[in-house]
Amino acid sequence: MTAPHRPMFLAGATWAIVGVGLVNWDVGIDLTHSPLGNRWAWHGHEMVFGFAAAMFAGYALTAMPSWSNGARMSSRDTALLLALWVLARLTAAGAIGTEPALVVSGTAAFMGFVTLTLARAALQSVSAKSVGFALFALAMTGIQITVLRGGILPSIPVLGFAILLQIVGGRMIAGFSWNRLSCTVSYEWRYKLAKLCGYPSAVALLVALLLDTLGIASDWIVACLVITATTEVARLLLWLSEETFKDSLLSMLTLAYSWLPLGLFLVALGRTNVGPLSDSAALHALTAGAIACSIYAVASRAVARRGNRLRPVLIDQCGFALLWVAAVIRVFIPVDTQGHADAPLIWCIVWSIVLLRHGAALLRPVPRPVFSGPKRSIDE
């Protein structure tokens, strides 16, 4: 229990199945008492704050010792973290009551605890990464409270996670690319240029999120989303090398990240009312595509085979491929077709694989570091 990713990845994978299964199949569970209003509102909330937030907490709190002065979660802290996550899920389903103060405190308790833990670690080591994680958790806690009070659009939490992916996911791909590839002088130049491109991309996405949160209907939101999407395509092209797809874990991260510019572009297109896709389909390019595929790619690193570098097991590669297919179906296949109906089933199969793999990992010692292999020097 001293490795938070283990219980939280299992919890998140379980909720990925529950959150999709309950709204797509009649399993006899009544969600009409949910304080969120209806099963689709519950689904949107839980896929962000039940599934994605659990995976974020597992990753951030496990990686916390690497960017703080050795701050770690104790077994008691991890047990409390899991208990608060369960409390939040029960509250969101209406199992504890619908009194507003109870709903807000019970549902936001999990993210609040994550925020306090990351903030405490950040105070021990004021690094950009530690402060960034703490600020993200704080922002998402505030957004969740506002969502529960009916104050903002459901797309705003998704854009919040898109910012996390742009910043943290971008750093991961850049770092793992440098660590894995035969970096020439030419690649070093591309690596530095991609890093520079990340700044205007992040600023534009933050501006879009801020305008959306304030409820300011502006063409600037569309412009900012397009700027970020275009810049992220440029970053992907700069990171890519002929060796990228020789490393399966790195290629999984890269393919997952490719959904980010696509999703932002589709959301921007939807804001102009001329896009070919529904708002829901465009938003799922970010949720089922960018966020879920990135979560899967990172989680696969924790159970990868160890050696001179990390190598995924075949079943994890197959699971990622299925998840990518499920995202394509959910976004691009028309509703009310058999193909579209297959997406939830594929999705649940994928996260069942995650449950199997990470459940089996409980029988083995926790590898250190959890998410990365041996590092190479930037001077090599």
Image: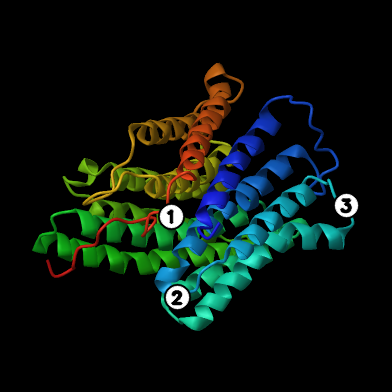
| 233 up-or-down from 203: above or below | above
First reached walking from the N terminus: tag 2 or tag 3: 2
Measured from the top left, where is residue 3 in percent x and y?
50, 58
The residue tagged 3 is: 98
Q: Nearer the viewer, residue 84 or 198?
A: 84
Residue 289: % across, % down: 47, 41
Q: Secondary structure at mark 3?
A: loop
> Which-is-in-front pick, marks 2 and 3?
2
Q: Amino acid at mark 1?
A: Val
Local packing at callout 1 (Cα closer than 10 Å; few below 14, some 14-19, many 20+) is many
Q: Is residue 233 left or right of residue 276?
A: left
Q: Amino acid at mark 2?
A: Ser
Where is residue 292 drawn, in percent x and y?
49, 44
Asked whether the residues under the numbered discs 1 and 2 touch, taking CB atoms below 8 Å apart as contact, a structural biologist would say no
| 164 with respect to 372 (left or right) | right
CA gap, disc 1 to disc 2? 35 Å
Which numbered disc covers residue 14?
A: none
Q: Is residue 54 above or below residue 318?
A: below
